[in-house]
Image (tube, rainbow, N blue to C red):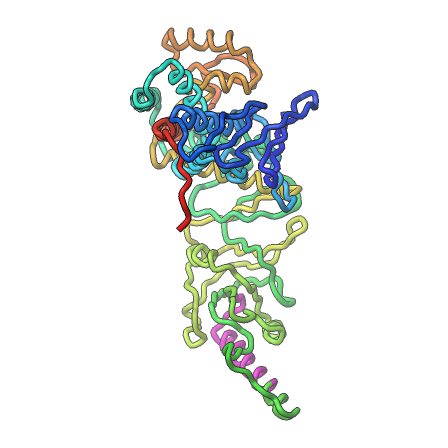
Amino acid sequence: MLIMYNLESGGIACVDSVGKAIGLDLFEDLGAMKMKGNTSKGLMTAKYSKPAEIRSSNIQAGRALADAVRTSLGPKGMDKMIQDPKGDVIITNDGATILDKMRVVHPSAKMLVELSKAQDAEAGDGTTTVVVLAGSLLEAADKLLKKGIHPSIISESFQKAALNSVQILTSMAGKVDLSDRESLLKSANTSLNSKVVSQNASQLNSVNLHDIHVIKQLGGTVEDTELVDGLVLTQRAEGTTKKVEKAKIGLIQFQVSPPKTDMDNQVVVSDYAAMDRVLREERAYILNIVKQIKKAGCNVLLIQKSILRDALSDLAIHFFDKMKIMVVKDVEREDIDFICKTLGCRPIASLDHFTSESLVEASLVAEVQSGTSKSVRFTGIQNPGKTVSIVIRGSNKLMLEEAERSFHDALCVIRCLVKKRYIIAGGGAPETELFLKLKNAGLNPISTVTELRNRHARGELTAGINVRKGTITNILEENVVQPLLVSTSAISLAAETVRSILKIDDIVNAVRG
């Protein structure tokens, strides 16, 4: 099933396998929600509503949001097509991306969106799992509330259950050695298996994890994704000099263009002689800068982007070409730190400080054509920092963006293992939401759950569901593993959010001051 979200209307159009459209309007007005044709009873129709109705509405809003991303869970989860008001389309099954793009108005539903963001910040993965888990906890809480159990008792019980769950998962976990490359790649592969680019997981996970600069380029396929042991800039080389061997590189933060007057001042030219004098002064000014740069021995120049005036004038490009100096302009401010760390240089803010000592060396700097786009690559850096650049390729913008999100998730998995050096079996073995994962995998929930419970009752702690084979296997032997932090943080954060929702007994509109 492919679910298409229209962000402009705030609704969701669900199309099932036989093409029947099902309307689901989420959160049209604050506190007013329609869920599969059933409308909540007059939430916020009065200034103060009954606590039971408020609590019920909050639970229904949370469950509706969880249902929206439920089918995207797991290696056989479905993708969502999201269309924004501008008409741009995103195809993804990343829970954090889906929820971030949805226009959510209901306050308790917003809490689940923030929950997904918190999981993304904490673990980087499990963003769909944590929302689905919270939705299931809300569903269980709703049943308990209907039996007359007080919300505070339910809240305390969820807290105890979460603590016990974390303890059980920790006891199941195995310690991981960060020097064991294969263990790290297995964990990254598990994260990538649920993505659109799962068939290219081996290309996306084979990365030595230092400081990594990700560049997206249209053209080619995901299989063409490559790791560059050096620096890659998305900017093009200006002028005719496109390749320099034995490069001496300088990074400057000043402009090579005529200075401009202040906003409140202006230059009045009364005759042609004055105009000619201004042009000669500009020419001499730029030529002096270029000569000093050449005198320092620089043959590759990087210029930071400026918002005050042009970083590089046409006249300056002409002079640099004559002196065989390769120039890359409009380097983004946020890239400066990475460039300095990679090249081992420092940015020069003034021409007076531009000397030969401020230059760094590389064996080759060249402009490279990759698909439909060009980039500048620095290789053979003399004193390289512990950084790498990865060029992600894709045949279209949608695949390119999903590949970048998948790569980000894989990196976050490794970060999790650094923060908490334990892994656990995947495949549903440690999860409490077995039924949800089984449903997504298309297996028989009753027989599969029964067999899985029997295996665990016999002490097979690593027995899990192999959704690709449709069987119960030792999931560790299948190399389906995940960081312990992903599961423990999902349980803790979901329980904490549900407890907060259960304690809300009223919603009051704040009066604007």
Prevalent SS, magenta region: helix
Q: Is residue 57 above or below residue 107?
A: above
For the N terminus, the image quarter is top right
The residue most toward the right is: 19
Q: Nearer the viewer, residue 479 or 468?
A: 468
Across and down, in percent, residue 326 comes to: 58, 66
Across and down, in percent, residue 79 comes to: 59, 30
At a point 67% along the width and 21% down the height, the residue shown is 17
Magenta stretch: give its range: 279-301
Residue 199 seen from this side:
no
Task: Say whether residue 294 is magenta.
Answer: yes
The residue most toward the front is: 46
Side (left or right) of 9 relative to 504: right
Q: Nearer the viewer, residue 222 or 448?
A: 448
Q: How many marks?
A: 0
Across and down, in percent, residue 288 comes to: 52, 81
At a point 50% along the width and 79% down the height, the residue shown is 264
Across and down, in percent, residue 343 comes to: 45, 58
At a point 54% along the width and 40% down the height, the residue shown is 101
Residue 29 seen from this side:
yes
Q: Is residue 327 above or below residue 131?
A: below
Quarter where residue 102 is shown: top right
At a point 61% along the width and 85% down the height, the residue shown is 279
Q: Is residue 92 above or below residue 283?
A: above
Quarter where residue 395 is shown: top right
Task: Say whether residue 141 is magenta.
Answer: no
Q: Nearer the viewer, residue 139 or 193?
A: 139
Side (left or right) of 320 relative to 437: right
